[in-house]
Image (tube, helix red, strand yellow):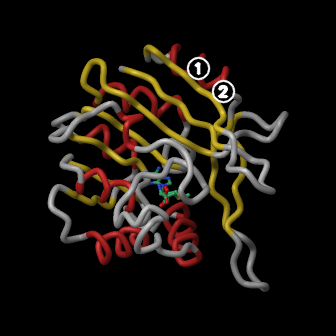
Amino acid sequence: MTDTAIAWDTYARQRPERRPVNARGETTWFNWTQYEDHGPGAELLDVAAGARVLDLGCGKGGNAAHLAAIGMRAVGVDVSLRQLAAARERWGQAPGLELHHAEAVRFLLEDREGFDAVYSVYGAVWFTDPTLLLPAVRERLRPGGRLVFSQRPPVEGCYGCQASYIPRGPDEDPLVVKRWDYEPNAWEQLLAEHGYMDVRASVLAPPAGARRVGTLVVTARA
Ligand SMILES: C[S@@+](CC[C@H](N)C(=O)[O-])C[C@H]1O[C@@H](n2cnc3c(N)ncnc32)[C@H](O)[C@@H]1O
């Protein structure tokens, strides 16, 4: 197993399952943000039932399961076996949902069918060198298909490849994964340089209350 997969398996152990129902009483839903019951939904993908959609770094699978529940062919990929085991246990029987153990760029290079939309929620797009990932996604998107991703906005002055620490026990060093942080305008430029159109990047405000950190949301078309 790679160091990255070990790190994400460790992370998986620390993360809770998605709630059984959301505040509206729904059993499946799409959430782009780090806050419950907050922000836009699957409409950002601009696809209809029957579309083939790809979740890069699907984690425990809640968003992909929602897309399958509303009639899409949802494909989730993740490097963490532990994340995928949780996804299979909760959503494995859902018609229209496919889960793959794979690294995102490798999966994109090997896929032969293509996708109507590709998305990532605090997922592989955040944790993969964009100069490798953005061309690979564009290659697999149908013309006009959307790439949409969300992640935490950068800390001011900390741009490009950054270290994310995954804590372990008191006597163990934390594990490290790399992530790529940019301001919205830098993401817009990067995507345009890789041939994407209609690129929009902005920071969605957090819900009312004490929290100050919003969510960076980026949409673009191939
Ligand atoms: C912060 S979690 C988010 C999971 C999920 N999208 C969610 O919203 O709960 C990041 C996920 O991306 C996966 N991941 C990170 N880099 C990846 C890569 N290069 N290829 C595939 N999966 C990756 C990790 O294993 C982890 O499950």
| Residue ID at (52%, 29%) | 131
Please state which amino acid type lies under the numbered disc 2: Pro
Q: CA distance from mark 1 to mark 2?
A: 6 Å
- Residue 195: image location, x then y, percent: 43, 14
* Label 2 CB sits under 8 Å from any ligand 1 atom: no
Q: Quadrant of the N terminus?
A: bottom left
Q: Element type at marker 2?
A: helix
Residue 103 vertical placement versus 174 (above, below): above
Give yes or no for contact between labels 1 and 2 (Cβ–Cβ under 8 Å): yes
Residue 7 lies in what quarter of the image?
Answer: bottom right
Residue 134 vertical placement versus 4 (above, below): above
| Residue ID at (41%, 34%) | 44
Q: Residue beneath label 1, please? A: 188
Please state which amino acid type lies under the numbered disc 1: Glu
Q: Nearer the viewer, residue 47 or 193?
A: 47
- Residue 17: image location, x then y, percent: 47, 74
Instruction: Describe residue 93's horizontal placement relative to residue 186 as left or right.
Output: left
| Residue ID at (63%, 29%) | 202
- Residue 21: image location, x then y, percent: 41, 70
